[in-house]
Amino acid sequence: MVAREIGYSSGMEQQSPFITNGAELLQARFFVPRGAAHGHKASPPADSAGLAISHGWFDSPFGRVLAMGSEHGLCGLAFADECGDAAALADMRGRWPSADFIAANDTLAQWVKAAFDGGTPPLHLIGTDLQQRVWAALYEIPPGHVTTYSALAAAAGNPRAVRAVASAVGRNPISWLIPCHRALRKTGGLGGYH
């Protein structure tokens, strides 16, 4: 499947091979084979019941960041400079209300360092099927490139679900690593992500 990309200089749409079928990306990139040391995992929100999620605060190039991770990988990054620590923590905890949260900076330090130093930490996507397909498609957008919500909807396998896709982009819990800031409206304007 081919996506549409908005060019920086001209604002004109042009063909781009960067977004492919979201379901294929989930199979290729986000499911951890048994015994794999490094990889990514995807889970539905219902699987968060009883899930142990470690969390800790770190400095990043973008200010203070709250990192969250399960045994499978990072499942959340929240930047707190604008909203404050308490609001960032409440937002992230509210995404997985049935999980068990454990303060554990040491557990996450290596993954956070990799996240901001150009590495590839393992990720654990916890969301609905559509959210996971959208986040997988976002993950594939190379630095310096953007796409539209319409193209993401097509890549996720439901071209008419543009509003649902925009909502999934806005619910992305792993900002920076899953670059929600690379999704634009058809007009080239920014959406309402945070």
Image (spheres, grey):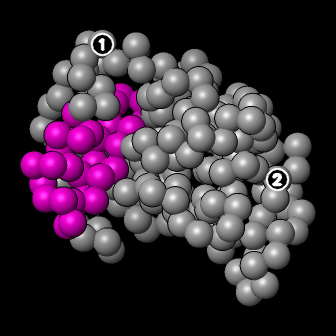
**In front of the other: label 2 or label 1?**
2
Q: How far apart are marks 2 and 1 (CA)?
A: 36 Å
Image x and y of residue 170, in percent? 46, 47
Dot 1 corresponds to which residue? Answer: 49
Q: Which picture quadrant has residue 93?
A: top left
Residue 187 to residue 105: above or below: below
Please state the horizontal and vertical placement of residue 166, each as a whole percent of the image. Answer: 56, 45
Q: In this view, does 45 lie to the left or right of 88?
A: right
Q: What element carries label 1?
A: loop
66 part of magenta stretch: yes
**Mark linked to residue 151:** none
Q: Can residue 12 be found in the magenta stretch? A: no
Question: Which quadrant: the C terminus?
Answer: bottom left
**Badge 2: residue crowd in 10 Å (few <14, some 14–19, many ≥20):** many
Q: In which quarter of the image is residue 30?
A: top right
**Which segment did they paint magenta?**
64-93
What residue lies at 66% left-to-right and 70% top-to-bottom? Answer: 188
Mark 2 highlights which residue?
Answer: 3
Q: What residue type is labelled 1?
A: Ala
Q: What residue type is labelled 2?
A: Ala
Residue 87 horizontal/vertical position (percent): 15, 49
- Residue 61 appears in the figure: yes
Q: Which residue is drawn at 86% across and 57% down?
A: 17
In-image side of 127 versus 11 (left or right): left
